Image: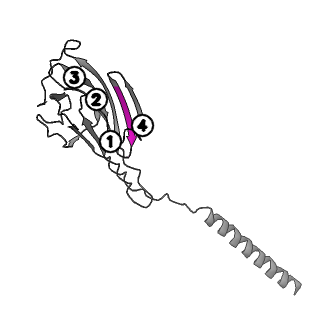
Amino acid sequence: MKSIISIRKRTINLALLALALIGTSLTSCIIVAEPDYGPRGSNGQAFFGIDYDFQAPYSYWDDNPSMPNNPFLGEMYHTYPGVFDFEYFVNPWEYWYGTYQIWTNPGQPGQPYGVPGANGADSFLLLICNPNGFYFEDWEECNCYRSAEEDVIIVERQVDGFNYRIEMRKTTIEERPTDNLPKYRN
């Protein structure tokens, strides 16, 4: 009788051990898959235009192929990111020249479970062509890099959809002759 009880105990112990081994081996084989991520959001677009406050420029030229000849002052035109040269005359013998750089904001990465990333914000630059050089409305409260020496202005701004850099100098046709044909003439 003792042998039957001991055989049953041994069988039960072996069965429990077998169950424990099988359970352990099955749980160690579970593979957790990374969720599929959605596509990256689209890059923002860039827009550029020229305008003035109190005196229209005498003429304007730039090498941005997206800017048409005879652009409407105050109108924003779709452009591509890049660095572009420009000149605008304040009268027949004095003008500002320099470069402006505009870029786009990248879209955000995709989210888990196929959710697309947020689109990048659009960038805007409206070049105010005043006789005293470029400025913008919130110049005093600007959280940007700027330098203004006599006849030299540098502004770099990367805040809330305003992503640009402008470097410009004032000169005369005697100091720096130009051969560029204007896209706009007043």
Task: Check disc 2 and report the residue beneath it.
Answer: 133
Q: Residues within 10 Å of mark 2 (few under 14, many from 20)?
A: many
Task: Check disc 1 and report the residue beneath it.
Answer: 137
**The disc labelled 3 sits on which kind of residue?**
Tyr
Position of residue 91 relative to residue 123, above or below, is above
| Element at label 3 | strand
The answer to which of marks 4 and 2 sits earlier in the sequence is: 2
**The disc labelled 1 sits on which kind of residue?**
Glu
Q: Is residue 30 left or right of residue 24?
A: left
Q: Residues within 10 Å of mark 3 (few under 14, many from 20)?
A: many
Task: Check disc 4 and report the residue beneath it.
Answer: 144
Q: Residue 75 occupies which quadrant of the picture?
A: top left
Q: Residue 180 occupies which quadrant of the picture?
A: top left
| Element at label 1 | loop
**The disc labelled 2 sits on which kind of residue?**
Gly
Position of residue 131 relative to residue 41, above or below, is above
